[in-house]
């Protein structure tokens, strides 16, 4: 009986041992020790003040090999680790030597829940270039990045506070800076816009600095403001001239193209403009007709003559053409509607369209006793004999009352086209 009891106890102990070993096998098979590698793009530098005291800064070598961190741990632990859980650091105080180029600094990787001896880093050193630190000052250029306010407004002024900023960084990067921009969004704005924003650093090739390069620069934010001006679209242009035409000639009239423009302005400037009957005056010294014996035209820049606080609206041309009509003494200019021009020898089944609504007819009195010429006194005609479908510049035959003579020959543009029918169009 005693022997049988002992056999049962031994059997039970053996069963427990077998169960324990089976459990170990199952656990190890289900959650084995494994290794996994991670590529780390960001290595934190420690103790940068170690070289800053000597007026130096460091930049990572462009040829630095990717930092690969290999962790040995149970599979369940590895499955819960991502790149963001790994912190890679390089302590400048542990650099092999600061006198080499590049400087090699040992890399240490840490991960919560993993013993340091189970973490390996390759390569083991971070390759850095040590440079002199420099600080320069740059004016901030403010832009709207092509955004536009409400159609009743224009951006009058763009300002930055501060107007200029200091940027500190490695001298090689500082020397690459061409300009500093700050953008503000004014889309559909109907009042002044102010916002704090980051600046964009532009290199000498016109390209923005990369995020990597920006990480080495100490750049502050700025506050930018867009002041909105109201638009006025009924502003007239009035021009004068200086000088005297050649002997026997007179200045008959002055016209401008355009004769009405749109401007935007501050409330003060628009109020002053209204007091001047909403008119921009081009001074006489802009156009000199001294000695001229024929029509004279001068191109000027409108913006040069806008009062302070006014500007042309976006997409407006700055070009202004000032034309002075110069005629022989005793001459005058009459405008004849092209609809009054008689068309002779029009081709069958053809229609005629004139390029302009009016033609200028310059005439001169042969006697001082004659009354002023009326539009209805002038007879004009064109001859389409032999003309087919197409565009033509044709002479205009002018018939004048007795006592008047034509000063200049006249031509007009016409378009001769076939008359369309409903059947043809269908």
Image (cartoon, rainbow, N blue to C red):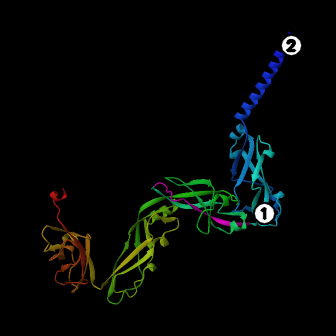
Residue 394's mark?
Answer: none
* Residue at left offset 36%, top offset 89%: 246
- Residue that label 2 marks: 3
Name the spot of residue 318 as percent of width and height, x first: 45, 70
Quadrant of the rendered image containing residue 132: bottom right
- Residue that label 1 marks: 103
Name the spot of residue 350 as percent of width and height, x first: 16, 68
Residue 356, placed above or below residue 66: below
Name the spot of residue 401 as percent of width and height, x first: 17, 80
**Hey, which residue is sitting farthest top in the picture?**
1
Q: CA distance from mark 1 to mark 2?
A: 78 Å
Residue 405, placed above or below residue 100: below
* Residue at left offset 60%, top offset 57%: 224
Q: Nearer the viewer, residue 151 or 202?
A: 202
* Residue at left offset 53%, top offset 55%: 186
Residue 40 included in the magenta stretch of the image: no
């Amino acid at each position: 009986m005693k022997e049988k009891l002992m056999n049962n106890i031994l059997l039970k102990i053996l069963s427990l041992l077998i169960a324990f070993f089976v459990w170990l096998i199952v656990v190890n098979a289900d959650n084995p020790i494994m290794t996994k590698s991670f590529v780390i793009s960001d290595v934190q530098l420690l103790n940068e003040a170690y070289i800053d005291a000597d007026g130096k800064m460091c930049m990572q070598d462009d040829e630095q090999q990717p930092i690969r961190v290999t962790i040995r741990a149970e599979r369940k632990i590895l499955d819960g680790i991502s790149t963001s859980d790994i912190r890679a650091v390089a302590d400048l105080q542990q650099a092999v030597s600061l006198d080499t180029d590049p400087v090699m600094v040992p890399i240490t990787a840490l991960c919560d829940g993993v013993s340091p001896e189970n973490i390996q880093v390759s390569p083991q050193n971070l390759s850095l270039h040590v440079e002199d630190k420099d600080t320069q000052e740059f004016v901030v250029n403010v832009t709207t990045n092509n955004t536009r306010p409400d159609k009743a407004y224009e951006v009058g002024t763009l300002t930055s506070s501060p107007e200029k900023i200091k940027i500190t960084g490695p001298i090689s990067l500082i020397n690459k800076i061409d300009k500093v921009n700050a953008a503000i969004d004014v889309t559909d704005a109907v009042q002044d816009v102010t916002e704090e924003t980051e600046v964009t650093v532009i290199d000498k090739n016109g390209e923005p600095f990369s995020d990597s390069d920006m990480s080495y620069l100490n750049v502050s934010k700025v506050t930018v403001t867009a002041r909105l001006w109201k638009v006025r679209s009924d502003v007239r242009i009035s021009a004068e001239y200086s000088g005297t035409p050649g002997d026997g000639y007179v200045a008959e009239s002055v016209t401008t193209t355009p004769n009405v423009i749109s401007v935007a302005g501050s409330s003060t400037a628009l109020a002053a403009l209204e007091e001047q009957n909403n008119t921009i005056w081009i001074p006489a010294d802009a156009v000199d007709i001294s000695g001229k014996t024929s029509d004279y035209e001068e191109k000027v820049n409108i913006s040069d003559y806008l009062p302070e606080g006014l500007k042309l609206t976006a997409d407006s041309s700055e070009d202004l053409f000032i034309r002075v009509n110069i005629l022989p003494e005793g001459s005058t200019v009459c405008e004849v509607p092209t609809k009054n021009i008689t068309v002779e020898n029009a081709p069958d089944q053809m229609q005629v369209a004139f390029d302009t609504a009016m033609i200028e007819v310059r005439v001169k009195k042969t006697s001082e006793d004659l009354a002023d010429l009326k539009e209805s006194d002038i007879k004009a005609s064109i001859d389409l004999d032999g003309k087919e479908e197409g565009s033509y510049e044709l002479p205009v035959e002018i018939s004048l009352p007795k006592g008047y003579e034509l000063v200049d020959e006249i031509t007009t543009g016409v378009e001769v086209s076939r008359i369309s029918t409903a059947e043809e169009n269908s």
